[in-house]
Amino acid sequence: MSVNLSLLVFLFFTLSTISCRVDQEGPGIVGPEPEPRINYLGRDSITTGDYRGIAINASKDDAFEVLEAYRENKTVAYVSAVNNYFADVSDLKNRLQFFDWLVLDDTYDTPTGIQFQLNAGQVTSIRLNQGTTLGQWPEAADPEVAIKVGDTQAILYKKLVALSKQPEYTHKFKRVVLGAKYTYAVYDAMKAELPWAFIYDTKSQGMMEQVRIYFKDKKVDYIIVDRFQQY
């Protein structure tokens, strides 16, 4: 499945800002307009029946199995359940191991925003939002100071704190975002009330669907589907 990464990130972050306001007519767009451009087609709020095999009142385990099938069949382009924004890098302490990626940026989705892929808190890859892969960040920094692929959780956190205090890099800590796949909701009771989200790529219909599954008492309560057309 070939889907523009910036478009996926744009859709997810845009709709995350309205996840608690399902009565709105449409999402508010923040930050620079992504390429390619998209057209918002509308929203469905599903409270009975099902959406693509995910039934209202189904258990979290049943919904999880459907999403796993989506992932295995590559019928979804992006899956996430938890997205956290932080104003202070010290808030990342003891959290990094629970997330799949970390993004540092000036504002919203700038080309030079830095994405750190994580596995149990360890850095597995580093790339810019524009797609350039890096061996370390900052590129010009001393290797002992820079964040590198292979850095463990403890080392990563220590370097993040140090870099955030250096004037030449503080601008990249204005927007600190941690993201995790929907499995995170399984073992964090507080985050379990947040929606699981994914992008379903309906190529045959010439559009994409941003889906958010809301839970209550460990069962699917309702589903919000926002539809977009790329142009």
Image: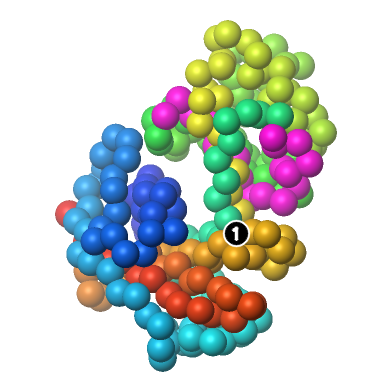
The x and y percentages for residue 68 are 58, 75
Q: Say few, some or many: other residues with alpha carbon within 10 Å of mark 1 (under 14 / 14 to 19 / 20 or more).
A: some
Residue 5 appears in view: no
- What is the count of numbered marks? 1
Q: Residue at x 69, y 35 (%)?
A: 91
Give the left or right position of residue 112, taking residue 59 as reference: left
Q: Determine whether 111 is above or below 212 in the image.
A: above
The residue positioned 80% from the left and 29% from the top of the image is 155
Q: Quadrant of the C terminus?
A: bottom left
Q: Which colour scheme is used?
A: rainbow
In the image, taking residue 54 as reference, residue 116 lies left or right, namely: right
Q: Residue furthest top?
A: 167
Q: Name the residue under label 1.
A: 181
Element under disc 1: loop
Magenta-highlighted residues: 91-107
Residue at the spot x=72%, y=60% of the render?
A: 188
Location of residue 168 in the rendering, given as x and y in whole percent from the top left corner: 55, 9
Which three-letter amino acid code belongs to the residue tagged 1?
Lys
Q: Which residue is drawn at 54% across and 80% down?
A: 220
Measured along the vertical axis of the image, is residue 144 above or below residue 124? above
Quarter holding residue 147? top right
- Which residue extends farthest right? 154
Residue 103 magenta-highlighted: yes
Judge left or right: residue 58 versus residue 158.
Answer: left
* Picture quarter with the N terminus: bottom left
Residue 176 spot, x, y in % from top left: 56, 34
